[in-house]
Image: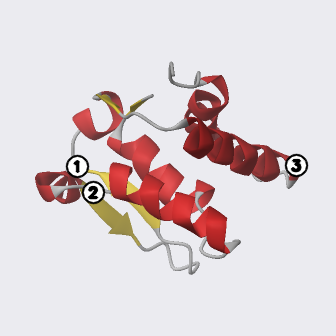
Amino acid sequence: MKLTIKDRIIILNTVLPQYDTRQNIELVKKIRDKISLKGDENSSVFLINNGNNMPEVGFKTSEAITNEIEFAFTNEELAYMKQRVDYIDQQGMFSESTMITYDKIIAASPPNT
């Protein structure tokens, strides 16, 4: 699946939960390890404090929003992320700013095995 830095931050902060079953947290850890920001990627991101206890993520470069990197997820990891996006949808928690990322997850095909 091709992801931008923005996509990765959305997945890390909204798709992957802090709490789940032991088995699912193992999947969360594997996904986080794959897509966590590395090295200079961190310098392209900053937090905006709007004073509402909900900091927003900002991007210093357009490349953080447009450049995509290919990430290979297992069938199990992809199924888990799809399940999480479905849950987010059922809770009415889609937003215009997250919809593109969520749609990428929904549309992602499992890897060839």
The residue positioned 12% from the left and 54% from the top of the image is 40
Q: Give the Cα separation between the discs numbered 1 and 3.
A: 33 Å
Q: Position of residue 109 (x, y in %)?
A: 59, 21
Callout 2 environment at 10 Å: few (<14), some (14 to 19), or many (20+)? some
The tag earlier along the polypeptide, 1 or 3, is 1
Q: Give the Cα separation between the discs numbered 1 and 2.
A: 6 Å
Q: Position of residue 42 (x, y in %)?
A: 21, 59
Lateral position of residue 74 relative to residue 5, left or right: right
Lateral position of residue 61 relative to residue 105, left or right: left
Discs 3/2, front: 3
Check disc 3 and report its element: helix, strand or loop.
Answer: helix
Lateral position of residue 52 relative to residue 87, left or right: left
- Asked if the residue under mark 2 is in contact with the one under mark 1, i.e. CB atoms within 8 Å, the reply is yes
> According to the image, label 1 marks what residue?
60
Residue 45, label in figure: 2
Q: Give the Cα separation between the discs numbered 3 and 2.
A: 30 Å
Quadrant assignment for the N terminus: top left
- Asked if the residue under mark 3 is in contact with the one under mark 1, i.e. CB atoms within 8 Å, the reply is no
Residue 99, label in figure: none
Q: Is residue 94 visible?
A: no
Q: What residue type is labelled 1?
A: Lys
Check disc 2 and report its element: helix, strand or loop.
Answer: strand
**Closest to the observer: 18 or 52?**
18
The residue positioned 58% from the left and 68% from the top of the image is 25
Q: Is residue 15 visible?
A: yes
> According to the image, label 3 marks what residue?
90
Q: Position of residue 97 (x, y in %)?
A: 57, 42
Please determine whether, in this image, residue 49 is positioned above or below residue 12. below
Q: What residue type is labelled 2?
A: Val
